């Protein structure tokens, strides 16, 4: 069974950009490895060991990102007012005055600092397929709480 990873078009593009940057950096890292190898005894050559490790990390990251694209299922957002992957929502937590903006994204795109929450997180899952004005109960590991959906874009 093949498991597809849902993501937004923006998330897919971000991975493509990172792959391009890593591929552009690969020749530089190979050159560093070759220069370190030419320094002599490899068993005590810390420059060689570090360069080999860095190139290995780059190659590993490239394989990981390519797999993400291979199994990506890009979800296009409908503008029907229903929350789905890619929706930008404004919510108000119970007993709070402030309105918080969030974007619903795929699991790999989630970034709390950037207010991007995964569709399968407790908050994201509770918001999915709801509309502005709905009062939603969120079942989180630390307990339940409610949020009101102010707007959906």
Image: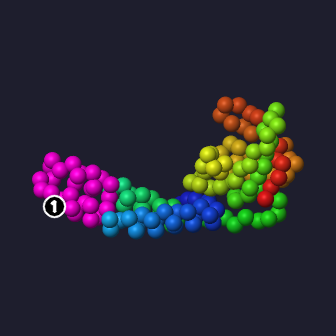
In this rendering, does residue 148 appear at all? yes
Q: Position of residue 147 (x, y in %)?
A: 80, 41
Res. 117 visible in picture = no
From the top left corner, tell me how far across and down residue 139 is, in percent: 72, 37
Looking at the image, residue 12 lies above or below residue 94? below
Q: Is residue 5 magenta?
A: no
Q: Is residue 67 left or right of residue 32?
A: right
Q: Is residue 24 left or right of residue 79?
A: left
Going by the image, does 58 lie left or right of 41? right
Name the residue: 40% across, 67% down: 23
Identify the residue at image location x=40%, y=68%. Answer: 24
Residue at screen point 71% across, 50% down: 102
- Residue 57's spot in the image, x, y percent? 36, 55
* Residues rendered magenta in the picture: 29-55
Comparing 141 with 118, the one in front is 118
At mark 1, the secondary structure is loop
Residue furthest toward the right? 133
Q: Is residue 124 above or below residue 87?
A: above
8 horizontally vs 130: left or right: left
The quadrant holding residue 143 is: top right
Magenta: main secondary structure equals helix
Q: Which residue is mark 1?
A: 38
Q: Nearer the viewer, residue 9 or 99?
A: 99
Is residue 33 inside the magenta stretch? yes
List x then y, in percent, for residue 95. Answer: 82, 32
- The quadrant of the picture occupied by the C terminus is bottom right
Give the colour scheme shown.
rainbow
């Amino acid at each position: 069974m093949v498991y597809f990873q849902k993501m937004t078009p923006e998330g897919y593009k971000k991975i493509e950009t990172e792959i391009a940057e890593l591929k552009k950096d690969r020749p530089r890292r190979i050159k560093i490895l070759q220069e370190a190898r030419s320094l002599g005894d490899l068993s005590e050559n810390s420059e060689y060991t570090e360069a080999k490790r860095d190139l290995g990390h780059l190659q590993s990251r490239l394989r990981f990102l390519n797999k993400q694209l291979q199994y990506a299922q890009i979800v296009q957002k409908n503008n029907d007012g229903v929350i789905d992957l890619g929706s930008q929502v404004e919510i108000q937590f119970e007993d709070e005055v402030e309105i918080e903006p969030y974007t619903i994204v795929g699991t790999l795109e989630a970034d709390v600092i950037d207010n991007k929450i995964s569709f399968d997180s407790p908050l994201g899952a509770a918001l999915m397929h709801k509309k502005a004005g709905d009062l939603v109960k969120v079942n989180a590991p630390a307990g339940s709480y409610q949020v009101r959906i102010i707007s959906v874009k």
